Image: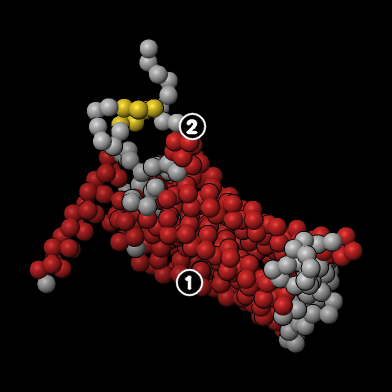
Amino acid sequence: MTSSRTERPTRNTPGEVRPLGAWGRLWQRLAPVRITAWVRAMALATVLANMTLILTGGAVRLTQSGLGCPTWPRCTDDSWSNVPEMGIHGYIEFGNRLLTFVLTVVAVLTWIAVTRLRARQRDLFVLATILALGIPVQAVVGGVSVHMELNPWVVGIHFILSGTMIALGGILYSRVRRYSLERVREAERLHDVDASDPLLRRLGIVALAVAAFAVYMGTLVTGTGPHSGDADSARHEFNAVLVTRMHSVPVWILLIVIVAILVLRARRAWAPGVARSAWLLVAVMVYQGAVGYVQYFNGLPGWLVELHLLGAALTIWAVAALFDRMTVLGTGALRERAVLRVDAPVDHRLAEAGRQAAERDAAGRETAERG
């Protein structure tokens, strides 16, 4: 009678098979040797979890609950959690801190999901490791901001760290989809190694740099505005109107860069995936700009500020995805490396491109050894 249980060869006797136990089957699902739907789901969960942290952090600030727990890592000197006497602000701040544990679980599961992929797709393992290590760094910076009574410079650094985590998570998600989904590779024309255009890479870098500056200026606007997180917290002493206008400058520059990408895409026959990523970013920026102007002219109501934070998180994700796509497709070496990292089986064009890339790598090593 044939067993329905999964079997695998033993290490000592290759011809002999033995059934996998429940733990073995669970491990194979949590840590597959190929990119599965589980791996893609965990990469997506990483992005969404870090976006949620920005939104809950915004809720803390907008409800003046930033010092609802007046110390860190404890909530009070005598308690790790809030107490009823602290009121609603204590519940809001402590709830935000609990999200760190959710982020940790997601990060650990994501790291496990890619740990057996590192032989072929080492970049996924590196990204997941950085994301996991970033969580305690975020927590410590958040604690420092509490001890410094929500100093706007420290709060700004905390937001930038969260944005960086979203960007890295977005790149991780883009790459697991590229390596495992043929429709993504077709949209990118990944197999066409000779189609790499350095201008594509340069524009991707410019878009990322301008977006990063826009995010930084956004932290200055926030640190100057009325939503400090606590009524007694210090604020930046910048002119609110001037710093807001300065924040809008890199946003408009980014929009110009995206329009340039769309125009050049048609003229230089770049892959359709580039246009899709660019149009997605345009859509997010239109939403973000509309919310930004409405909140500015209506006195910064809290619910609109929260929607603006959502737009900021979506913009960071969209920019990171566009940057990754443009730099990979615009750099011959990165494109070749991506081809080699595609999960087998691959179509014949990808296989041929991978073979050519491997031959070039071998030739390069031989040249280096002779030198």
Residue 215 percent location from the top left of the image: 62, 72
Quarter of the figure with the C terminus: bottom left
Identify residue type, mark 1.
Val
SS for callout 1: helix
Residue at the image position 71 percent from the left and 71 percent from the top: 72
Name the residue at the left extreme: 370
Residue beneath disc 2:
22
Using the image, determine if residue 67 lies above or below residue 320. Answer: below
Does the rendering let one see residue 84? yes
Using the image, determine if residue 348 lies above or below residue 328. Answer: above
Residue 134 percent location from the top left of the image: 55, 65
Residue at the image position 73 percent from the left and 67 percent from the top: 74
Residue at the image position 83 percent from the left and 80 percent from the top: 232
Identify residue type, mark 2.
Ala
Quarter of the figure with the N terminus: top left
Residue beneath disc 1:
206
Q: Nearer the viewer, residue 369 or 2?
A: 2
Residue at the image position 47 percent from the left and 49 percent from the top: 112
Using the image, determine if residue 223 lies above or below residue 268. Answer: below
Residue 27 percent location from the top left of the image: 46, 40
Q: Based on the displayed image, in which of its 4 quarters is residue 123 positioned?
A: bottom left
CA distance for labels 1 and 2: 50 Å
**Residue contact between numbered discs 1 and 2, judged by CB atoms under 8 Å:** no
